[in-house]
Image: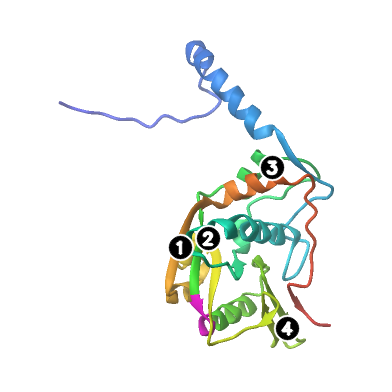
Amino acid sequence: MKIEGRQIQIDSSLSKKELIEEFVAPYRNRINEVLDSTLAYAPKAITKTDGELNTTAGNLMADIVFNQSNPVFKARTGKSIDFVLLNHGGIRAIISEGKVSARNAFEVMPFENNIVVAELKGSDVNDMISYLIKSGRAHPISGMQLILDKTKTVKSIRIQEKPLDVDKTYYVATSDYLVSGGDNMGFFKNNTSITDTDYLIRNAMIDYFKKVDTLAPKVDDRFYIEN
């Protein structure tokens, strides 16, 4: 049997097939209805460019991951998440002022990334801090506060409002992409355990949107340089 193939460009030159269009239309309409239903409201635009080392979009994402995945992790392990680290580049869109829908979650987080929890030694958390300082980017964090002085030297590291203890192990919620070394976050490879929550970051966002009326994240003092 001889099999041949050819490339077909999907563009405006293709005409619709009415039979296919009639078949697909009800499914497409239902999907659009679900994606565009209002779940919450944003009084202001939420972006990843409105702060130097922490932003409204990053803080919202990190706080959502903390709040939504901690009950899952606790139910499975009896442990609690200490803090969250995501990556600045993983946020792919702003949430505009106005109604917030599931489509916004797909736009902000188009990747199929699960929330995973890595167990790290305090010494490896130090490597993470060095990475954050060197990158100079607003990587989203929650549950941790990092203060730098004017020379960008660490002045204070607090996790769950307590100073970093290098002799302790910490449970860090992140994405399966980052825990595999994505974005050069090699410190995650030193983990002593990994727990996959089987919970997509995007689904955590949608679940959170359904629970709250208003999204009003702020640029705060979780990661900043003193004047």
Quickly name the residue at label 4.
148
* Mark 3–mark 2 distance (CA, rounded to whole Å): 21 Å
* Figure colour scheme: rainbow
Disc number for residue 195: 1
Image quadrant where one finds the N terminus:
top left
Tell me the amino acid under the disc marked 1: Thr
Give percent across and percent down for residue 2: 18, 27
Label 2 – label 4 distance at C-alpha: 31 Å
Q: Amino acid at mark 4?
A: Leu
Asked if the residue under mark 1 is in contact with the one under mark 2, i.e. CB atoms within 8 Å, the reply is yes
Q: What residue is shown at x 42% (from left), y 75% (from top)?
A: 192
Measuring from the top left, give residue 212's x and y in whole percent. Answer: 74, 46
Magenta region, residue range: 120-124
Query: Residue drawn at (80%, 53%), measured in percent from left and top?
Result: 216
Q: Residue 27 versus residue 19: which sits nearer the camera?
A: 27
Q: What kind of residue is marked 2?
A: Phe
> Which residue is disc 3 drawn over?
210
- The local secondary structure at tag 2 comes to helix
Does the magenta portion include 121?
yes
* Residue 99 image point, x, y percent: 77, 39
* Pair 3/2: label in front: 2
Compute the Cα span from label 4 to label 3.
36 Å
Disc ID at residue 73: 2
Occupied quadrant, residue 150? bottom right
Q: Earlier in the sequence, mark 3 or mark 2?
A: 2
Which sits earlier in the primary sequence, circle 2 or circle 1? 2
